Image (cartoon, rainbow, N blue to C red):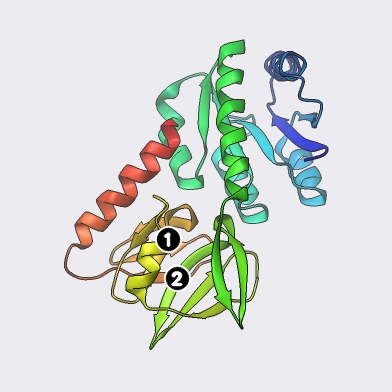
Amino acid sequence: MEDMRIMILDDDLEARTRLERLVEYWMTKEHQEIFRVRTYGDAASFLEAFRARPAEIVFLDILLEKDVNGIGVAAEVRELAPECVIFFTTGTPEYAVDGFAVHALHYCVKPIRPIDIAECMRRAQEKLHWAERSIDLRISAQTIPVPLRDITYVESELHDLIVHRANGKAPLRTRMTMTEAEAIFTDRCFLRIGRSFLVNMDAIREARGDVFVLTNGTELPLRRQGRAELRRIYETYRYQKMRE
């Protein structure tokens, strides 16, 4: 990977400068010249730059001045770049749970230490490398690798399987039953939620009543029997991802 961007948003100059130096120290120590760091002191300039060119990794202060909430900024980041790795910085851990709503990967309590940045970057690297994993599917007499990060959910239709993908990519259709699909989609992120649906839990924005709402707005129905258990599995998965 070349020229991967890290963006930092914190309205406190001292905290922002400290975080930038810690990230640059980690880059030097780990010989990670592929990263470029940019810092911002207000949400407006940060979002303007992010819209122009999204970053792979962002550090967001949860509590900003002028009643701006870092969670709201993160929500827009997630809309613009679903795969962006989000870390929150905070003076107190009580707000960290709010990061679940925007799938933040981790949070750091100020004053941030070198060991905190090392842990964040370890998690970020694992998350970004996840994009390399794929599943081979037989499509129109060809076998093609489909990255896991591209798959939002899988739908059974008669004797076919429709693989729905993120970022406006056209669905893929392959000859396969849902039972056969379960034997292939074995990564822990996939969950069978009904007779006809298998969902990538990383693509879920929220659990709402009897449906899972995906980041693109799609609503997938949960089977009636065992619905509470499905929600529990998702919440456990989300919690474990936050702690990894």
Q: Is residue 197 above or below residue 81?
A: below
Q: Nearer the viewer, mark 2 or mark 1?
A: 1
First along the sequence among labels 2 and 1: 2
Q: Residue at x 73, y 42 (%)?
A: 55
- Secondary structure of the residue carrying tag 2 is strand
Q: Which mark is residue 154?
A: 2
Residue 95 as seen in the image, left or right of residue 148: left
Q: Calculate the distance from the C-alpha at mark 2 to the C-alpha at mark 1.
A: 10 Å
Q: Specify whether residue 111 is in view.
A: no
The type of residue carrying mark 1 is Phe
- Front one among 151 and 168: 151
Q: Which residue is mark 1?
A: 185
Picture quadrant of residue 120? top right
Of residue 157 and residue 9, the one placed in the foreground of this image is 157
Q: In what quadrant of the picture does the C terminus appear?
A: top left
Q: Is there a contact, CB below 8 Å, between mark 2 and mark 1?
A: yes
The spot of residue 234 in percent (x, y) is 33, 51
Residue 240, quarter of picture: top left
In the rendered image, residue 73, in percent from the top left (x then y), is placed at 62, 43
Farthest-out residue, bottom:
158
